[in-house]
């Protein structure tokens, strides 16, 4: 059995050079380009429409967004996978999207949140945007509740924006490898005004 011969060493060398150069370019792009895990990938209109039944929620009830909660679907683009107690934002912009059962009764949205622990700071400045506008809040590392006003609308959302991300440190001193900003534990659409 004979082995197929290359037309020339020049052809083989050219092919090997092409593959080597292609691999080098891909590696360079991967190492220097933006981290795809941090990019916010918006939902298409079709995806958003499919999610409406899963995002239709009652008002005046705290809705946990943990991994085993039926309300985890209100977490939109920019969130990491839900954990046992809530979900971290993994991008500088993340969204919570809901469709209240009684849209005319919603006056505010309440969030149970905590900021990522980075350095000696006890809080992180975070911008929350709802149908009523934007609010800057110093979110405590140990956690707090944030109540935001909303305008009447069939779709209620909260966009969470951070200037930067950080890797949290556990109480035992272990550094999480992920870059995160805010952890959301629960969300409530309230019939009362934001106070």
Image (spheres, helix red, strand yellow):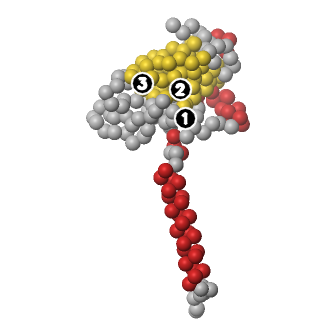
Tell me whether circle 1 and circle 2 mark residues in contact (CB < 8 Å).
yes
- Residue 58 pos. (x, y %): 60, 18
| Secondary structure of the residue carrying numbered label 3 | strand
Residue 124, labelled with which disc? 3
Give the residue displayed 39% in from the left and 22% down from the top. 123
Q: Is residue 93 visible?
A: yes
Residue 160, labelled with which disc? 2
In the rendered view, would you say 93 is above or below 108? below
Give the residue displayed 56% in from the left and 84% down from the top. 9
Disc 1/disc 2 C-alpha distance (Å): 9 Å
| Secondary structure of the residue carrying numbered label 2 | strand
Q: Earlier in the sequence, mark 3 or mark 2?
A: 3
Q: Earlier in the sequence, mark 1 or mark 3?
A: 1
In the rendered view, would you say 29 is above or below 44? below
Disc 3/disc 2 C-alpha distance (Å): 12 Å
Label 1: which residue?
78
- Residue 157 pos. (x, y %): 61, 23
Q: Earlier in the sequence, mark 1 or mark 2?
A: 1
Q: Is residue 70 visible?
A: no
**Across the whole image, how many numbered discs are drawn on residues?**
3
Indicate which label's residue lies in the foreground, 1 or 3: 3
Residue 1, labelled with which disc? none
Q: In which quadrant of the rendered view does residue 76 lie?
A: top right
- Residue 72 pos. (x, y %): 54, 30
Dot 2, crowdedness within 10 Å: few (<14), some or many (≥20)? Answer: many
41 and 83: which is toward the camera: 41
Query: Which of the image's four quarters has the N terminus?
Result: bottom right
| Secondary structure of the residue carrying numbered label 1 | loop
In the rendered view, would you say 112 is above or below 190? below
Give the residue displayed 67% in from the left and 29% down from the top. 52
133 and 45: which is toward the camera: 133
């Amino acid at each position: 059995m004979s082995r197929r011969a290359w037309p020339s060493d020049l052809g083989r060398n050219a092919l090997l050079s092409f593959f080597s150069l292609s691999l080098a370019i891909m590696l360079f792009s991967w190492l220097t380009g933006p981290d795809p895990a941090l990019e916010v990938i918006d939902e298409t209109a079709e995806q958003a429409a499919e999610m409406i039944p899963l995002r239709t929620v009652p008002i005046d009830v705290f809705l946990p967004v943990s991994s085993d909660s039926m309300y985890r679907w209100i977490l939109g683009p920019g969130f990491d996978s839900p954990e046992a107690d809530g979900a971290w934002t993994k991008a500088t912009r993340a969204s919570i999207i809901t469709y209240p059962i009684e849209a005319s009764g919603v006056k505010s949205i309440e969030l149970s949140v905590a900021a990522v622990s980075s350095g000696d700071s006890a809080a992180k400045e975070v911008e929350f945007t709802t149908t009523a506008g934007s609010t800057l809040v110093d979110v405590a590392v140990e956690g707090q509740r944030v109540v935001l006003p909303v305008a009447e609308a069939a779709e209620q959302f909260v966009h969470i924006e951070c200037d930067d991300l950080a890797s949290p440190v556990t109480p035992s001193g272990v550094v999480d490898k992920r870059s995160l900003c805010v952890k959301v534990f629960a969300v409530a659409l309230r019939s009362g005004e934001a106070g």
